[in-house]
Amino acid sequence: MAIFKLSKTNLIIPAIIFSFGLAASYSIIVSAQTAEIIYPVKDLGNCENETACRNFCDDQNNISACVAFAEKHDLISKEEAAKAKAFIQSGKIGPGNCSGKNECEAFCNDSANIEVCLSFAKNNGLMREYEIKEAEKFAKVLKEGAKPPGNCRGKNECENYCNNPDNMEECLAFAEKAEMIPKNELKEAKKALMAIKSGVKPPGNCRGKKECEAYCGEPSHMEECFAFAEKAGFIPPEEAAQARKMMPLMAAGKMPGGCRGKNECETYCADESHMDECANFALEAGLMKPKEAEMFKKTGGKGPGDCKGREQCEAFCNDPANQEACFNFAKEHNLIPPEEIEKMKGGMNQIKKGFEMAPPEVSQCLKSTVGEEILNKVQSGQMMPSQQLGGQMRDCFEKFMPQGGPDEGGFGPNGQNGQMPPAGMMPPQEAGFGGPGGCKTPEECQKFCSEHSQECAEFQKGFNKFEGILREKFDGQMPSREMMEIPRGDLPKGNFDKFKDAPNSGQMPSREMMEKMMKNGEIPESFNNGEIFNREGFNKQNIPSNIPKIPDQFKNMIPQNVLPQMPQQIPQMPDNKIPGITPLPVQPQYFQPTTEFQQIPGQ
């Protein structure tokens, strides 16, 4: 028994594929055996029995009458009728000028004539596209010298040969060489081969697809079929255990809608009108917990974007383009608790403030990294940023506002080592000046900025410009903490060129020198709540126009005061919020033996 699927073109000389067209009458008569045909048949030359009618239709001159008779009595499908008519239009002469079923079969069963027969079938529309491709593969391996398994000739002979378990390995090797079997089916077929070679017998010693399907379709045989599938490695033990939970329900005829097999049950449970029935079945079979069953009913067994199952929904919702759809789906189905919604709203307000206070470089980074459309949706509150999106946003802030150490242009917790603490964030309390609103500590500044975003934004602009001037005037150096601890909290005013005459050229002046210059009116007077650059007197001074880029000292203000930790709501949604998305009652693994035996030749 070869556990792989052979279509009508596999291991079959192409002649058999279009043998209907060459001898349509034969198929018609065979079909007529099961129909209520009364002899003599007037439309078929008044033939008085099956043999006489077969002889009549085997005559190429009578094909038109036979096809018309078959169509009239629904003995052939529309597709078969179309093929027969195509053959009639070809002149009723087969490849190699053969005529009649036996003569054409004999001609095309000769491997030397395969290409001629295949070309004839293609030109006369006697084969489907996928059949042509498979037949071409078959012809190719024969041309290269390969022999069909057991040198079989024709569909029935090859099927009979490959249905014998003793010939399975030979048939599988040929199918693999001819690329007639998909990789996933090949993998399963080899598992079955290994199982059979190790002594595991097919359920009921069934042979062929139809026979095995019929055997495993009986509830009383389910355990045997599951056992074979498990031993052959078709399903893991834990999935087999779950499938066994359904066996009593199958035996009792309690499957949803009485379905049998994967496809039938999937089709039934995909109908929304059957959702409750399928969910109740899964609950009774122990395949779902009560909460999951309720979720299944709520969502119709589907997640955002009609995803099914945890992996599929995770993949869908982890795509930034789908974040909005996932968030809206969760809200619509009450999958996010109200308190989480409120927390998210608070987070969105903080994010908006962060955007308002962000320097241009950060905004440009966000647009190029996240995309302007998504960024606008986040800013307007239409879209909740995911964990991934939040990380990208934070990266932009950190890229242009790195904390770093003293040697990297950053600052320590107290602004030591000649570095200036971030304005308004960590000033020495004894210095007499503070941050936005006069705040003295990080906690005070955080609280103030959470309630006065506009004022903090102005303060930041003032500090950025001030620090830029200092860097420009003093060769990129910043004053030390000690120097900035001036009793009155005053900052430079006047002509900054005086500093260039200080000892140790290129370095910032000492605290004593700063105090002296302040008393002499040579440096600016105050740094008052971000207003120093709005004062008329300051604007009249000699301020450089080439302000440097955003300083790296301002990193702490954004993450601490403006951009709080993102709520982790969307990425986890498929895991924690939509446990019932997976339509468990119709999972393929529960019907694995049935589906696996669809790959057994015999079709």
Image (cartoon, rainbow, N blue to C red):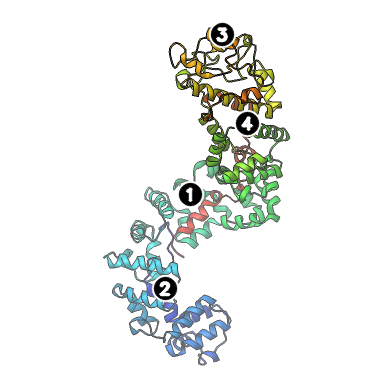
Q: Are marks 2 and 3 in contact (CB under 8 Å)?
A: no
The disc, 4 or 2, on the residue closer to the chain's N-terminal end is 2
Q: Nearer the viewer, residue 161 or 16?
A: 16
Q: Looking at this rendering, what residue extends furthest in the top direction?
A: 512
Work out whether 218 lies above or below 404: below
The amino acid pointed to by label 4 is Met
Disc 3: CA contacts within 10 A as few (<14), some (14-19) or many (>=20): few
In the structure shown, which secondary structural element does the residue marked by tag 2 occupy?
A: helix
Q: Which x, y percent locates residue 470?
A: 52, 21
What amino acid is found at the position of numbered circle 3 in the picture? Lys
Rendering coords of residue 451 (x, y %) = 71, 26
Question: Which one is nearer the viewer's eye here, 400 or 486?
Answer: 486
Q: Is residue 229 above or below residue 465?
A: below
> Looking at numbered disc 1 in the image, what kind of residue is underneath it?
Ala
Spatial CA distance of label 4 from label 3 is 36 Å
Q: Secondary structure at mark 1?
A: helix
* Mark closer to the chain start, 4 or 3: 4
Q: Name the mark nearer the viewer: 2 or 1.
A: 2
- x, y percentage for residue 92? 41, 86
Q: Which residue is mark 2?
A: 17
Give the number of the disc on residue 229.
1
Return the disc, 2 or 3, that comes first in the chain's sequence. Answer: 2
- Indicate the amino acid at tag 2: Ile
